[in-house]
Amino acid sequence: MNLRTLDPLWEAILAEPAPRRYAARARELELKVVAAGWAMRHEIEDIIVLQDPRLLGLDVRDLAESLERPFVTVYSRPRLRFGTSVGHEALSAPDVCALLVALEATGFEIDPSGMVSSLLPTLTGKKLLTSAELDLLHYERVRHKAEVTYWSDREPAGDEDVREFKTSTGYRVWALAGADGARRFAVKGARFRARPPAQPVDCPVCGYRHTPGDAESTHFHRLFHRKEVRVLHAVANPRLAGRLGETQALVLVPMASDRWLHQLVHERAIRFKREMRFDSIQYPRPGKMVEEPAMVGFLFINDGPDFPPHSVVGAGAFVKREERWELNWIWVIPAARRKGVLRARWPALVDRFGDFDIEAPLSDAMAAFVRSHGCDRQKAGLLADQ
Ligand SMILES: CC(C)(COP(=O)(O)OP(=O)(O)OC[C@H]1O[C@@H](n2cnc3c(N)ncnc32)[C@H](O)[C@@H]1OP(=O)(O)O)[C@@H](O)C(=O)NCCC(=O)NCCS
Ligand SMILES: [Zn+2]
């Protein structure tokens, strides 16, 4: 969680709770939100602050976003048939309620139980539920029993200040601040019971070893998993749609390109390095880009039926050495191999980079490719045993 979101929560949980609260007024607002189905930002802030004034200044939009319940734009019904409608940023009533549940679980004097009871009847008969609605269904069963943890984006460093205390709602807080301003805190519900430690497992998709049920390990697995899935599985990238020229399936990334394009190449250079067990990543980090005309990255964009359009199925880079281009590295996602991805783009690469060299040592797959599709010069470069 970024510090902008985390800071107000942190300050508030460390502060003394205020004696005067206006729970009845908050309840009225909640009912209004339940009836409307949506809440504007100021309404949500009122519901929260009326119950726990320490949360004044909390940016609910940031908080909602970091809890993966982003605001959406809703429109007022036009008053005339051809009238225009005005858009408002709003959060659905179940999302608002889930936000309150999260704040209660963080140890604040927020009581979502009334709003949960008002919303539950609206869920009866629904076959598909959003994650917020699911939270409401489980609410009574898990109330006061959860453990929640918040991290800033980076690990706290330097001298650490650790505090442990109980909130006015009987929740136990463990808070750690690094000298660098990074922090993390964990809050255990008043009825939290530690379960026996679970066994670590390897994720079948990304291979990350983690312990299900352990908040910290799950958090880091999720970060890793998302990144891996983005690279390993071709996912549609709408930004690429605008980049496709005549050579539909190949996007060249010269050094002066936009940072996000370099980022796409770089992420794949990391996978190449890992798979080949090389020591270094053969592509500069997007921030460290120099105007280097002698290096050109490239992206293979899917144009077949097996993956989404505008998804990246491979990447690589060419380097110019003594007036001749050399293919420095190339990596096709495992799921797209032996389907002709490289074969289909090879003529375009030859067009642009000429009779290029290929940096040795060649992998077995690349050597096999060169044997069937390489030019004479490339074939002559193969070692005798390849
Ligand atoms: C090498 C690599 C880029 C090939 O890309 P690709 O899109 O899978 O290759 P293609 O499907 O276009 O292959 C075309 C032909 O090359 C040959 N070939 C490719 N990979 C092969 C392999 N693993 N074994 C044997 N032949 C292979 C075949 O003749 C193939 O035709 P076929 O499938 O009809 O038999 C890909 O396997 C890869 O990324 N490997 C890991 C990284 C790597 O080795 N990079 C090269 C470092 S030098
Ligand atoms: Zn995973």
Image (tube, rainbow, N blue to C red):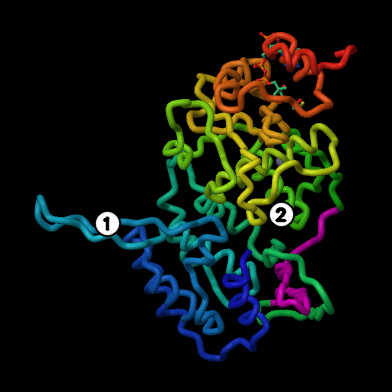
User: Which residue reaches farthest right?
Assistant: 385
Residue drawn at point x = 46 percent, y = 39 percent: 238
Q: Nearer the viewer, residue 16 or 158?
A: 158
Give the x, y percent position of residue 168: 66, 82
Name the quadrant of the N terminus. Answer: bottom right
Where are the magenta residues, as a range?
A: 170-196
Q: Nearer the viewer, residue 81 or 327?
A: 327
What amino acid is at disc 2? His
Residue drawn at point x = 59 percent, y = 24 percent: 349
The image quadrant that residue 380 belongs to is top right
132 up-or-down from 97: above or below: above
Residue drawn at point x = 65 percent, y = 74 percent: 107
Res 108 visible: no
On the image, numbered disc 1 is attached to which residue? 75
- SS for callout 2: helix
Q: Is residue 30 left or right of residue 220?
A: left
Q: Does label 2 point to a residue whose CB lies under 8 Å from ligand 2?
A: no
Give the x, y percent position of residue 120: 46, 54
- SS for callout 1: strand
Q: For marks 2 and 1, give the CA distance.
A: 35 Å
- Do residues under tags 2 and 1 come within 8 Å of each other at their CB atoms? no
On the image, numbered disc 2 is attached to which residue? 219
User: Which residue reaches farthest front?
Assistant: 322
- 183 is within the stretch colored magenta: yes
